[in-house]
Image (cartoon, grey):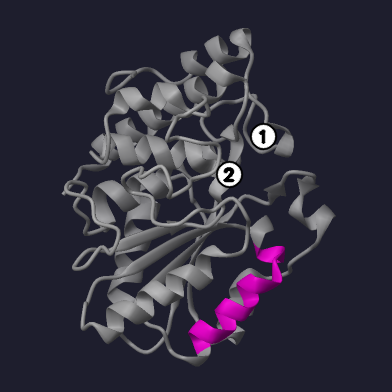
């Protein structure tokens, strides 16, 4: 079991990875990646039962994770590499020609840890429900996790899947929502207000946990532990994480402006100065 200090150190290092990856190619999505870093680190280094090597697509006997908002691939790649799925040095190939680490995760390149392509928003929960149903059919007690952006919940397919999961009482799935209140065009309330997400999920038959400090590692670890304890009881679980886009760097935090913009040389130096190297850069 990882200590909170180690998980926090890992989060700092992952944020350094994210910034350096997108800066190197002047392309990528740092804001959302940095906002959900605590969740991804807590998931892969504490909550999930998974075996990085040897990697198998079917994941029999292991917990599975599906990233639905695939544009935040930088945090996904960093966490996968640092948890042992592939060499950390491969992060330097992010978004380069012939790299396995494309801007949105794909499966045809055979990158370990990736079980679905997630360039198009709104599809991850549907895929995850298929995996959850398969585990049930096979008598596999493992869990299925997903992550979604709050702006992604404006997609209709999400709510079809939410309805299905509640109606069919899919109780081996935990869907996390990165509720940072921002999307590419501005605040989510300005683009398309979604009201009370917790009440919406509850109306569809889900049990909901709201994490008011989604960038506090202890809070996230506790919430994942509580969510796991609630599985297997006849209802799906939603974990709503109230986070800050760009968290960890003062000039990036809390604004949609860093949704898909890479820092320049001066900005990178400033940002890395706020995130001391903890576990070694690639």
Element assignment for label 2: helix
> Which is nearer the N-term, disc 1 or disc 2?
2
Give the position of the C terminus as an image quadrant: top left
In the depicted structure, whether residue 237 falls above or below residue 76: below
Residue 227 at x, y = what percent?
Answer: 36, 69
Residue 258 at x, y = what percent?
Answer: 67, 32
Q: Nearer the viewer, residue 218 or 73?
A: 73
In the depicted structure, whether residue 266 falls above or below residue 89: above
- Which residue range is magenta in the image? 153-166
Q: Nearer the viewer, residue 116 or 225?
A: 116
Is there any visible trace of residue 271 in the rendered image? yes
Residue 260 — which label? 1
Asked if residue 162 is among those painted magenta in the image, a careful observer would answer yes
Element assignment for label 1: loop
Residue 7 — which label? none
Is there any visible trace of residue 16 in the rendered image? no
Residue 87 at x, y = what percent?
Answer: 27, 29
- Look at 68% across and 56% down and name the residue there: 151
Magenta span: chief secondary structure: helix
- Look at 62% across and 63% down and name the residue there: 122
Is the C-beta separation of discs 1 and 2 under 8 Å?
Answer: yes
Question: Is residue 68 found left or right of 267 in the rendered image?
Answer: left
Q: Quadrant of residue 202?
A: bottom right
Question: Is residue 219 found left or right of 33 in the rendered image?
Answer: left
Residue 43 at x, y = what percent?
Answer: 33, 53
Q: Quadrant of residue 25?
A: top right
Asked if residue 148 is among those painted magenta in the image, a careful observer would answer no
Tell me how far mark 1 sits from mark 2, CA to CA.
Answer: 9 Å
Q: Residues within 10 Å of mark 2 (few under 14, many from 20)?
A: many
Q: Which residue is mark 2?
A: 71
């Amino acid at each position: 079991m990882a200590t909170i200090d180690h998980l926090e150190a890992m989060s700092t290092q992952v944020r350094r990875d994210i910034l350096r990856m997108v800066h190197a190619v002047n392309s990528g999505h740092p804001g959302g990646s940095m906002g959900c870093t605590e969740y991804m680190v807590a998931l892969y280094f504490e909550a999930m039962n998974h075996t990085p090597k040897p990697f198998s697509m079917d994941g029999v006997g292991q917990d599975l994770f599906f990233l639905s908002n695939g544009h935040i691939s930088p945090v996904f790649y960093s966490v996968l590499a640092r948890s042992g799925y592939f060499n950390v040095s491969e992060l330097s190939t992010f978004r380069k020609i012939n790299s396995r680490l494309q801007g949105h995760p794909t499966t045809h390149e055979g990158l370990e840890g990736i079980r679905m392509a997630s360039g198009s928003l709104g599809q991850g929960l549907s895929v995850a429900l298929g995996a959850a149903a398969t585990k049930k059919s096979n008598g596999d007690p493992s869990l299925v996790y997903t992550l979604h952006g709050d702006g992604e919940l404006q997609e209709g397919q999400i709510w079809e899947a939410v309805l299905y999961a509640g109606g069919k009482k899919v109780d081996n799935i935990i869907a996390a929502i990165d509720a940072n209140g921002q999307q590419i065009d501005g605040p989510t309330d300005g683009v398309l207000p979604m009201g009370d997400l917790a009440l919406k999920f509850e109306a569809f038959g889900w049990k909901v946990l709201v994490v008011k400090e989604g960038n506090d590692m202890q809070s996230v670890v506790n919430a994942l532990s509580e969510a796991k304890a609630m599985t297997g009881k006849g209802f799906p679980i939603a974990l709503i994480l109230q986070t800050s886009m760009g968290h960890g760097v003062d000039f990036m935090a809390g604004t949609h402006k860093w949704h898909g913009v890479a820092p320049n040389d001066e900005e990178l130096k400033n940002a890395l100065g706020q995130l001391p190297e903890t576990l070694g850069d690639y």
